[in-house]
Image: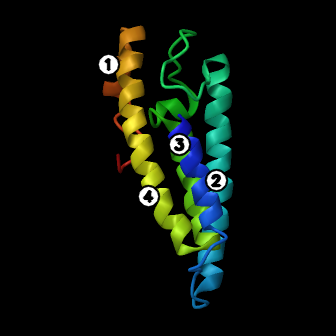
């Protein structure tokens, strides 16, 4: 958990450091970055609200009931998906370093999601059936 917040801070700081983006095609890059930031924020907030009291930054789940509705009907870890959109968009807006570090953050969240899923399966006997219904762990049609 500490590593994820530290890495998120590093991504933000990297956006203020060179190298930046070349000026060519900047309008398209900026527009796409803004769309990712807004859409990612909306998706992550929606997922957070859907979790309600079960929301925690720690891998161990709170036994408040398995949430399978809303964005959780599309991907099993929608907050990570939304935040990856936010950080990828931020990287497109600010610089190559922030975008590259977003890839590292994605790797960290993949590992954390695997740990969370083992813990969720221990707490909720129907978690495996949920995983069978919702194939995508973090990104629809990708992973």
* Circle 4 residues within 10 Å: few <14, some 14–19, many ≥20: some
**N-term mark: 2 or 4:** 2
**N-term mark: 3 or 4:** 3
Residue found at x 61% / y 90%: 23
- The answer to whether the residues at label 2 and label 4 have Cβ atoms under 8 Å apart is no
Q: CA separation, marks 3 and 1? A: 26 Å
- Examine the rendered structure and indicate whether residue 106 appears above or below residue 66: below
Relative image position of residue 1 (x, y in whole percent): 53, 34
* Circle 3 residues within 10 Å: few <14, some 14–19, many ≥20: some
Q: CA separation, marks 2 and 4? A: 18 Å
Is residue 61 toward the left or the right of residue 124 in the image?
right
The residue at which mark 2 appears reads as: 39
* Circle 2 residues within 10 Å: few <14, some 14–19, many ≥20: some
**N-term mark: 3 or 2:** 3
Residue found at x 67% / y 70%: 16
Mark carried by residue 4 = 3
Q: Quadrant of residue 30?
A: bottom right
Residue found at x 62% / y 41%: 44
């Amino acid at each position: 958990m500490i590593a994820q917040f530290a890495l998120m801070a590093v991504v933000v700081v990297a956006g203020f450091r060179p190298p930046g983006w070349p000026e060519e095609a900047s309008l398209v890059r900026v527009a796409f970055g803004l769309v990712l930031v807004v859409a990612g924020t909306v998706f992550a907030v929606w997922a957070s609200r859907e979790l309600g009291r079960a929301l925690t930054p720690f891998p161990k789940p709170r036994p408040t009931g398995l949430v399978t509705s809303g964005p959780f009907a599309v991907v099993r870890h929608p907050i990570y998906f939304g935040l990856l959109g936010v950080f990828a968009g931020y990287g497109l807006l600010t610089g190559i370093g922030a975008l590259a570090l977003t890839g590292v953050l994605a790797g960290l969240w993949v590992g954390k999601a695997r740990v969370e899923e083992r813990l969720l399966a221990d707490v909720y006997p129907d978690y495996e059936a949920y995983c069978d219904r919702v194939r995508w762990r973090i990104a629809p049609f990708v992973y």
